[in-house]
Image (tube, rainbow, N blue to C red):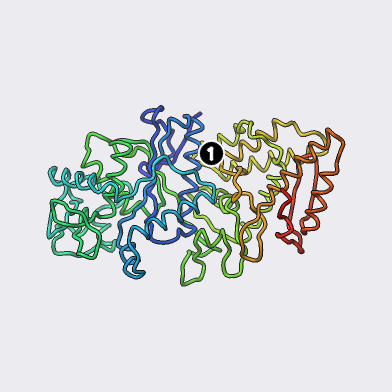
């Protein structure tokens, strides 16, 4: 299987050739954990989750290592602690848990390693000492700064010269800087702020050094893929490259750089001032009188646009995705998970993560299965359809991914697919015993609860009708 990826560093689509096929390594920049993740934060998670699934499929789960970090030392976290009176650790533990719950809800697998920056302070100090010794960094007034002029390739990732970056960037003006573009590796901490002892006094790391130190410790001086949103290309990823390549000149740091485009809401940039700023949890649970959106629907909408194109979240797209997934789940309700991914789906994903093309193939497969409903659909076709969808993280057996009905306008999610599967199993058993009493009783109870029931050879589809009463579902399973 040939995988092609658009390398931001070369601005070309390239054939992916891992350094070691038995040890494929990927690092993706994670969140700063001070609040709920907004829906834009979910896009890189979903994009690189698909790539992770592809790499595991091609090279084997035991031969892929995916690292995504948590930044748990940051001025935003410090400010949140000062405002709330809570401890920094309490805030970061809580928000880290929120983040993981929300990303799992949209179908993302946990990475193999999820390091916290505070666990690698020693490694950061060691890297900074090495950079000073090599002449790439200097200490000044309790700070340590990286000298951008010491790295001749600075700016190649983003395609900018240092002069252009100075002219266009908001750089911190400080008398201790030799060059306005020099960036902080270490800064002093006052007594009320978190800090660690270092050769330059009590302080804390700058943002950029974190990922360089953690990726080196967990993946080595050279690894295969580094990813993130394109808003990180400059300065964060540019600075990572400079630090890492100067600290470990014998290595190559990351060989392939992937960046996803940004997200809009209803055609506009997401902004609190425009009233279109939503967290992932807002969508999942419902907000402003709007019903919640199942995680699988969120994922489908995101994957319907290629990762290198701007993505527009709209309510209309969510409704269309919901209708499609309900149909697909009914078609695949009898699947046991024993199928093989369709080569066309695999090829689409392997071609620079063309998830929109992969979804088009799934539409074709679903249409073919649906057209065969009057006859017996070959079981292998249904199994392969489900396996193909699961390569994208869709149609998985997760309650929060398959819950389509809501208790109240914005209440908790009710998973009707569980009831559909149960009714389908009763029907299959009844076909053998010729005793349909259990099927009739289940169907009557569902109808009494206001559930619309549609049964066919392909499966069972349930929808909440206008008189749906979730309380009447209790005890049916």
Residue at image position (20%, 51%) is 148
Indicate whether 47 appears above or below 263: above
| Place of residue 264 in the rendered image (x, y in percent of width and height, measured from the top left) | 50, 60
Residue at image position (75%, 48%) is 461
**Residue sitting nearer the eye, 357 or 84:** 84
Quick check: 81 left or right of 179?
right
Q: Which residue is mark 1?
A: 349
**Residue sitting nearer the eye, 202 or 359:** 202
Residue at image position (63%, 49%) is 402
Indicate whether 27 appears above or below 282: above
| Place of residue 271 in the rendered image (x, y in percent of width and height, measured from the top left) | 46, 67
Few, some or many residues within 10 Å of mark 1 (<14, 14–19, 20+): many
How many dots with numbers? 1
Q: Secondary structure at mark 1?
A: helix
Residue at image position (81%, 50%) is 443
Residue farthest along the bottom direction in this orientation: 273
| Place of residue 269 in the rendered image (x, y in percent of width and height, measured from the top left) | 48, 64
| Place of residue 28 in the rendered image (x, y in percent of width and height, measured from the top left) | 39, 45
Indicate whether 238 appears above or below 34: above
Residue farthest along the front direction in this orientation: 475
Q: Image quadrant of residue 85?
A: bottom left
**Residue sitting nearer the eye, 448 or 121:** 448
Quick check: 313 left or right of 472?
left
């Amino acid at each position: 299987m040939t995988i092609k990826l658009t390398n931001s560093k070369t601005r070309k689509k390239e054939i992916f050739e891992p350094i070691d096929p038995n040890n494929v390594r990927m690092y993706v920049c994670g969140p700063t954990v001070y609040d709920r993740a907004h829906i834009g934060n979910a896009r890189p998670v979903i994009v690189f989750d698909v790539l992770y699934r592809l790499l595991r499929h091609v090279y084997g789960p035991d031969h892929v290592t995916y690292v995504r970090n948590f930044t748990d030392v940051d001025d935003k976290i410090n400010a949140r602690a000062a405002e709330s009176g809570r401890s920094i650790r309490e805030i970061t533990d809580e928000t880290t848990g929120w983040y993981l719950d929300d990303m799992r809800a949209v179908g993302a697998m946990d990475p193999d390693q999820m390091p916290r920056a505070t666990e690698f302070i020693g490694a950061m100090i060691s890297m900074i000492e090495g950079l000073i010794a090599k002449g790439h960094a200097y200490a000044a007034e309790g700070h340590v700064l990286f000298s951008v002029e010491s790295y001749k390739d600075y700016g190649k990732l983003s395609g900018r010269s240092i002069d252009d970056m100075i002219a266009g960037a908001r750089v911190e003006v400080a008398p201790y800087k030799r060059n306005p573009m020099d960036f902080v590796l270490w800064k002093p901490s006052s007594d009320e702020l978190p800090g660690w002892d270092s050769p330059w006094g009590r302080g804390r790391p700058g943002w950029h050094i974190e990922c360089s130190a953690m990726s080196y410790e967990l993946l080595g001086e050279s690894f295969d893929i580094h990813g993130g949103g394109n808003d990180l290309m400059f300065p964060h990823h540019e600075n990572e490259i400079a630090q890492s390549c100067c600290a470990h000149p014998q290595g190559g740091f990351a060989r392939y750089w992937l960046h996803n485009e940004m997200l809009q809401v209803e055609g506009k940039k997401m902004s609190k001032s425009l009233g279109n700023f939503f967290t992932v949890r807002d969508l999942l649970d419902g907000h402003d009188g709007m019903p919640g959106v199942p995680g699988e629907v969120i994922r489908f909408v995101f994957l319907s646009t290629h990762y290198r194109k701007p993505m527009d979240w709209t309510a209309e797209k969510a409704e269309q995705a919901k209708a499609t997934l309900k149909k697909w789940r009914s078609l695949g309700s009898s699947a046991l998970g024993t199928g093989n991914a369709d080569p066309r789906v695999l090829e689409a994903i392997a071609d620079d993560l063309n998830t929109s093309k992969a979804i088009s193939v799934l539409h074709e497969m679903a249409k073919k299965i649906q057209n065969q409903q009057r006859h017996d659909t070959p079981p292998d076709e249904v199994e392969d359809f489900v396996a193909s969808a699961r390569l994208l993280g869709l149609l998985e057996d997760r309650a929060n991914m398959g819950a389509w009905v809501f208790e109240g306008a914005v209440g908790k999610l009710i998973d009707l697919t569980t009831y559909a599967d149960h009714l389908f199993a009763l029907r299959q058993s009844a076909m053998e015993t010729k005793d349909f009493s259990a099927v009739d009783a289940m169907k009557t109870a569902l109808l009494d609860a206001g559930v619309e029931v549609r049964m066919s050879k392909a499966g069972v589809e349930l929808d909440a009708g206008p008189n749906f009463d979730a309380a009447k579902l209790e005890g049916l399973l």
